[in-house]
Amino acid sequence: MSLLKKIPLKFWLILSACIIIFVVSYLRLAVNLEAISYDFRLKLRPALKTSEDIVIIEIDDNSLARLGSWPFPRDAHAAILSFLKSAGARAVFFDILFSDPSVARSELPSGAQGTLAYQTIDLDALFAQAIKESGNVYLPEAFDINTAPLSNFSPPKARGYSASLYEQFKPYIRSSGHMNVFTDPDGKLRRVPLFIQYQNILVPHIALVMACDVLGIDVRKVKLAGRRVIIDEKLSLPVSNNTSFMVNYPDRWAPAYKHFSYAQLIKANNEQYLAGKPSPLLDQFKGKICFIGLTATGTHDRKGMPFEELYPMLGLQASIFNSIIKKQFITDAGPLANSFLNLIAFLVSLFLCFYFPPFKALGRMAIFAVSYFICATGLIFSGLWIDLFLPLLIIAVTYVALTLYKFIEEVHKRQLLEKELDIAAAIQQSFLPKDIQVEPRLKIHSFIQPAKFVAGDLYDVVRLSDDKVGVFIGDVSGKGVPAALIMAQAVSLFRVFARASMDPANVLLNLNKELCQVLQGRFVTALYLVFDTKERLLRSCCAGHLPILITRVTAGETNEVLPAAGPPLGVLDIAEYETFLTTLEKNDRILLYTDGFTEARNKKGEEFGMERLKEAFGTSKGLKADIALSSMTEKLFEFSRGLPQFDDITAILLEYLG
């Protein structure tokens, strides 16, 4: 149990996903959508060449208009057989169920010496005689079976006939077989059962019977071998559940086969009979396999198929026959093979999503999905049907799910980081002076706002003696945590050196030597001021920092004071610094700041700059010092409204009260 607890959650999630994918794929829960993807790929496939021996004789709209309402009297079928026999047709198939006796009778005039009498003709007998004379007629039957394919490889069992062949015709036909089909949930016809078991007899599909006769194969010698049906050890047909056989439609109805109208043949036969001359159509049927059936608009014999929403069932029989004699089969890869394909699609998608960042993973997933689509479509062209919809769905869902997972994981990490940064910000604040009113004659007000959680700006105020106060401000190159760590170290070192010397230059010199040993590629600009309130002197030293601003009541203007400047701290360990002296006057105001103040930009790309800072500082001299500092920061943020803060902003306003 303890070992299971050590297995990461990711493993269990991936394992669960694999199981779900395998079950969904194996149970064919997405079969309806896969059927749609099958139709789409079949339409992309070039049209297949059909056997030149197949001829379609349509009972079309024109035939119904000429011969009357359906069903036609059986003497019309006898006339068709008579014509085809004279033409030398090889085989004739009626896609019509003849299960009952004809209700029509034909009465012909007969008699002599002016006596008029009528002779009644038995149309069934007439049709039976035509079948016998032809010797090559195939008639179908239909069984009562479950029309949905089941989950085993045994043929479906028939409960009985739904339309058996009329007994009068049985002795004379070449052969018979069933014409049942499997109807998919969307109403389309894609499969037929090759065999139906009825009373322990395997009844073959009528199109299979005809194809075996043409190929010289005994259709009664059948061996069921899982996903194959082997006939007479010569013909191997791919099947899936219930010996269901994929109908390989070669093309749309009109261009797939050579078509003739039923009425056209009746007319040709009548003309040949009356004129006694051979019809020019006879040559069109010599040695042909003739499929006769109903194709008229609005009749019940038009169903949906991959190419067309309304397709004659006659075309289905012809397509099965054509597929078998030309050995052009569609093989269903089956649930097991598709399940492994879907698992592979999932695992490849996992690898791409885990190995690459989201944006790069998106491009590679798109390439993978397109490659799989091309492969699946190409396999249809060669006769193999594999899943397409489910693998593409798996690829898409995997990317979305893992991207969302990474996003949530990143948010969680960010939350943890923000908590740590909050702690770091609190620690950083502890480095800054809490109460900076250390001398009654010197008022000090400060403002600091990091660009991120923690700042690289620093300042400090130290009481050096009863009448001396040190004020330090600095700016570490860069932002964020690295700059904040340098800031903490610089403040700590400053406090040590500030108490050891009253000379600002000496303090910065010692601080520079220490920082040169620890800083690599970074630096600190700094400004250190020592206020001597008794002597009314300001000693200052600059290490690459911005000038201080002084506003004096007596002068009434704001001046820049740039102490003798040395290089930033941490750059050169042999740097020299110089202390600069300034006399203090009563009510002098001194502003120390970092470049976050002057380099702040507005939406036009303009910097706040030194002139605006001077103006803001000068116009606030009538306000109290703390209010004056707030006024300056408000003007700064109003200037850069709508843009993110680019850099840390720090300012210290000092007022000498004299």
Image (cartoon, helix red, strand yellow):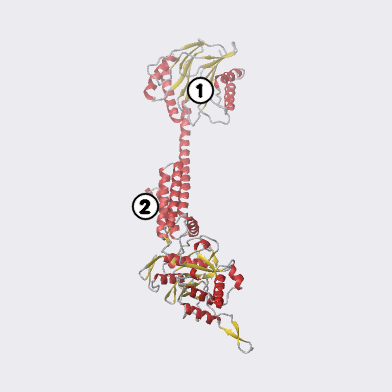
Task: Check the image and report above or below for 44 versus 213.
Answer: above
Residue 487, image x, y percentages? 44, 25
| Res 139 visible | no
Q: Label 1 is placed on what type of residue?
A: Asp
Q: Nearer the viewer, residue 616 or 37?
A: 37
- Badge 2 marks a residue whose secondary structure is loop
Quadrant (top left, top right, bottom left, bottom right) of the C terminus: top right
- Disc ID at residue 350: none
Residue 346, image x, y percentages? 42, 51
- Disc ID at residue 1: 2
Residue holding disc 1: 595
Task: Check the image and report above or below for 422 versus 306.
Answer: above
Q: Are marks 2 and 1 in contact (CB under 8 Å)?
A: no
Disc 2/disc 1 C-alpha distance (Å): 60 Å
| Res 261 visible | yes
Q: Which residue is depicted at the point 45% across and 12% down?
A: 579
Could you tell which of marks 2 and 1 lies nearer the N-terminus? 2
Residue 352, image x, y percentages? 41, 45
Q: Nearer the viewer, residue 553 or 183?
A: 183
